[in-house]
Amino acid sequence: MQKKLLKNYNCCDMDLSIEIPYKKTKHSQKKKLLPYLLVSPYLIFVTVFVVFPVLFCFFLTFNKWNIISPMKFIGTDNYSRLFHDRLFWKAIINTLKFLLLHIPLQLVISLFLAYLLNQKIRTASFFRASFFMPVIVSGVVVTILWQQLLGYDSGLINRVFMRMGVTKVGWLVDPEVAIYSIAVMATWKNLGLYVILFLVGLQTVPTQYYEAAKMEGASRWQQFYHITLPMINPTIFMVVILSTIGGFSLFIEPYIMTGGGPLNTTLSAVLYIYKQAFQYYNMGYSATLGFFYALMIMTVVVLQKKFIEKEV
Amino acid sequence: MKKKFSIKKLFLYAALMVAALSFIYPFIWMIGASLAPQHEVGKMTLWPDHPGFGNFKLMIEKIPIGRSLINSLLVAVFTTSLVMITGSTVGYALARMHFKGRQFIFYVIVFTMSLPFQITLIPNYITMVNLHLVDTFFALVIPFAVSAFAILMFRQAFQGLPQALIDAARLDGCTETGIIFRILWPNIKPTLVTVAILSFIGSWNEVLWPLIVIRNEQLMTMPQLVTLFATGGRADSQLGVKLAAAVLLALPVMIAFLFFQKHFIQSMASTGLKD
């Protein structure tokens, strides 16, 4: 691309350090304002949709409000309610259970598939594309599809189980199992993206390292453990952070599949925040939950960063 | 030696094939089941014995799915265009101009990117209520019209271009917006494609926000309408109809993906590689 540019604009290829000022206008004031004019869409946006909401959210946490009747100041009642709200903590624990299966599963399978794809495979693009299909398709589609796979009586998986003589599993109706079924589904949906990220990571490892290790007589596993893993550490870090953030915003899957049941075992934190706001119209309380939850997510991500950076 | 090698390859391909099937099979099954008559839906076979469009007909009678398809398209097209325009102007100013507060704005952008959306969700809904935008297209487009990610992508792309390009255009008397859209845009096509794909897909698949701000069925986006249809009991026990709705929602993206596979994968991967 560089070459093409220079060909077109050869005459100006003199001294790159001299910058020609932008178009002279009659008012030099206007010239000064131009950059601000250009960034103004962002400034307006960030004020209206980020700064104001964050401040307003904080303000709402001290109020009781159902949108229709006037707001009522209630001090820190929302916070004490939050700390005693069993259902909210259950939702947090559900989300953590989800992450506890989702993240390791995501890491291991996507790294494994990326490792296989990296072995100079023919038709690699076919495999990549098939892994990637669920990533681009709406979560709504994936959820409706998996609802049919995981159904108790008519679900495909249970039918296969029956045929093999295994007892049926209540994938979405057993309170002990449901959240993990959703975790497996979410892994299936996002796997392709992480396979690609790992593939990019694996391709940055210099092949000389492996050759040197082979000369020393290192086994495949040793090569993987001592060369590959340390070299792709940044990718692992990225995958953990991305799937943590994605997992914390779990919403549409339980919303469609289970509505939070059975016995609220698949109620995710975001689903609970949504219900508080748009089913019970507790805007103040819902904002409190959102505020607290956002702080929690940021804390977890920062801790992960610290922890992983130390490991490196 | 030779034999061991081939067994390894065999295992490799077998493992990959199993994985690929586990991704493709459900989709093909879904398309097959959506074409199956009611009594055949539950079967495990990939293709129904008597395929037909009965489920699709039923769905069209029950919900304004065609309307929602147009709504989704309109919202995605407008959102994407705005994201690209605002992303370029802001990105250009940050990359190529010197002004007070430039660094500060850059840090604000990076910081807001890491801010979880849960904190702004409720207040943004209230903003929409106060601006009387609930149940309008504006509510679906405006909150997504500026993307921090797009700004950073454009900033990076503009930084990589030679100053001579801009200088030449300025000497010719080109305005700054002319420079951005007529001189620089043709030189950053990969970035344009990436930002376009990401914001289009993001907009097309967004479902939580429409659920909050749109109540009028005529204005609903496709994922929203399908979600409400699937959960609201209107699909009743008719699995086939539900699956038909899912197929219709998936099909446009899947077809686009089959054609522009490489661009899609590269674009999505770049979301993670940003840092």
Image (cartoon, grey):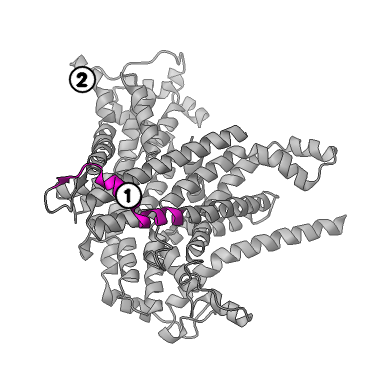
Q: Position of residue A12 (x, y in %)?
A: 43, 18
Residue beneath disc 2: A30
Number of numbered discs:
2
Q: Is residue B169 visible?
A: no
Chain for numbered disc 1: A
Q: Which of the chains bears the disc numbered 2?
A: A
Q: Which residues are magenta?
A: A71-95
Q: Left or right: A167 with respect to B80?
A: right
- Which of the numbered marks, if any, corresponds to residue B28? none
Circle 2 — which element?
Answer: helix
For the residue marked with disc 2, what is the amino acid?
Lys
Front residue of B26/A70: it is: A70
Q: Is residue A256 above or below residue B36?
A: above
**Which residue is tagged 1?**
A82
Seen from the viewer's position, the closer of residues A92 and A302 is A92
The percent position of residue A78, horizontal first and vertical second, equals: 26, 47
